[in-house]
Amino acid sequence: MDRIKTLLQVLSSTEIRALKKFLNTFHSRGENKALVLMELVEKNPQISQAEASRLLYGDPASKAFLMLKGRLIDKLYEGLSLSVSLQNHPALKDDPQGFAPVKLQKQLLYAQILIKRGLENLAFELLEKVNEQARQLHLPEFRLQALIYLRSLAAAHHESVATYHQEIEEVMAAYEVDIKGVGLLDDFNVLTRKQSVYDRAIIDWLEGHTQYFKEELERAYSARAHYYFLTLLTALDEGREDYGSGKKHLQELIELISRETGLKSNNRLGAPYLRLAAIELMAGHYEAGREAALEALAIFPTHKFNHLSAAIYACFGHIYTDQLDAAKALLGTLGWFAQRKRRNTSMEVTRYLSSCVAFCQGDLRAAVHLLGNVNEILADKSGWNTSLRIHEILLYLEQEKIDLAAARIEALRKHIARYGASDRDQVIFRILYLLEKRSFYYQFLNDEMEALMEDLTHKYPWSPISQEVIRFDIWLKAHQMEVPFYPLLLAELP
């Protein structure tokens, strides 16, 4: 029963309706018990096997029920392969190319059936169609199956098979390099699963395997293998912090995906734009970073987490190119969507960033209001949530609510003690703590505070793609100079 329940849970209402019609096509008279069982589970997902068996057959341990359950599971699997199910599945709507491999596999099955029925001419036409479609989509595994059947049909009719031999060898070589490429990506994902920073061992691994894979690609070219190769190269560029090379390879990746029909998908095309945005922002190329982020934003479906990541980068780009109204408009759109879809993560990030934009505009009242009751952003307690707490402290200090700021600094101390924080955030906390001890007098910092400020500039520098939107060292310098924060921020951006 668990398999039936699990399968039904992933079906949409459209798929459920199609499946019920599908079940009816296999029934001629009497009660359609497969349909009854399906509707029983729909109405009561917690129903036990014994109870369902008793309701249908009057026996909680009926052998007939076990046979019925097996037949329904088979029909559920068959139902998942119906075109209506494939075309209406959310993942395939976001990525239509994902439908192609299933469609080709079904056509190969049809060809097998036609051959068994003696309809070899129809099978031949279908197999040639599969071969051509698989060639255009860079799916050598389907070409290989189609070509083997075509060769057998030609041999059965005493026709030459030499052309097929040569073509099969070429396709096998391309398929082999594809398999090696996806294997390398799987190995790389295992290596990096538990760490986001590339250490020397990972960089060495990438250097060795990209060189090896380059030679394999030269031996037998495949567009899909080329995609795997460029993906690994961009990872190597990231590990080396070679942003110039990274931009070059990401542009190559974007061009390859855009050019090759079989590689196109929202995630494949959006991902390099997102990484390009991060590189440009990190390099201080804020306009280029903003444009790359907006490209990614337009590509990723709005209900995917990558859409939120692209929106955050675009927001950073807007803020650091003095386009605060554009940032505000973008966050307004994102906030409406997040609320509609009940995506709390999106709502909290949006409120925080909107509060930062209002701060930059000098609208402290709006900044406080927008922050609202946001107590936690994501599960990243040492990142986003630390920045949220620092932002709240700065808001209180801007409003000269000294007691509230002092209370929040103590709360920040406890938060960092419990969850930890980045080196930069710990330095920021230390400066805030020392400021409190001197009643928030910003002029003439003592030696310790000057040293800490020096650390923020050189030892633990600010990152343009961090959660620290209101750059603390510039904020403090603005207070020392008694000038507005935002113009000074723009003037001193790297």
Image (tube, rainbow, N blue to C red):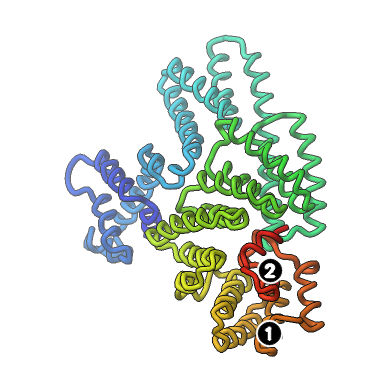
- 366 sits left or right of 136 in the view: left
Front tag of 1 and 2 = 1
Which residue reaches farthest front?
Answer: 482
The picture places residue 271, in percent across and down from the top left corner, at 60, 47
Chain-order first, disc 1 or disc 2: 1
Image quadrant containing the C terminus: bottom right
The picture places residue 326, in percent across and down from the top left corner, at 51, 53
Residue that mark 1 sits on: 441
Image position of 161 with respect to 478: above or below: above
Is 71 or 262 nearer to us in this picture? 262
Residue 61 placement: quadrant:
bottom left
Image position of 189 with respect to 220: above or below: below
Disc tally is: 2
Image position of 330 with respect to 395: above or below: above
- 92 sits left or right of 360 in the view: left
Dot 1 amino acid type: Tyr
- 52 sits left or right of 270 in the view: left
Residue drawn at x 50%, y 69% is 363
Label of residue 352 in the image? none
Query: Around disc 2, counting alpha carbons within 10 Å, would you say few (fewer than 14), some (14 to 19), or many (20 or more)?
Result: some
Is 372 or 221 nearer to us in this picture? 372
Which residue reaches farthest left?
Answer: 30
Q: What secondary structure is found at the residue carrying circle 2? A: helix
Is 234 or 373 nearer to us in this picture? 373
Residue that mark 2 sits on: 474
Query: Around disc 1, counting alpha carbons within 10 Å, would you say few (fewer than 14), some (14 to 19), or many (20 or more)?
Result: few
The picture places residue 379, in percent across and down from the top left corner, at 56, 70
The picture places residue 270, in percent across and down from the top left corner, at 57, 45
Q: What secondary structure is found at the residue carrying circle 1? A: loop
Dot 2 amino acid type: Ile
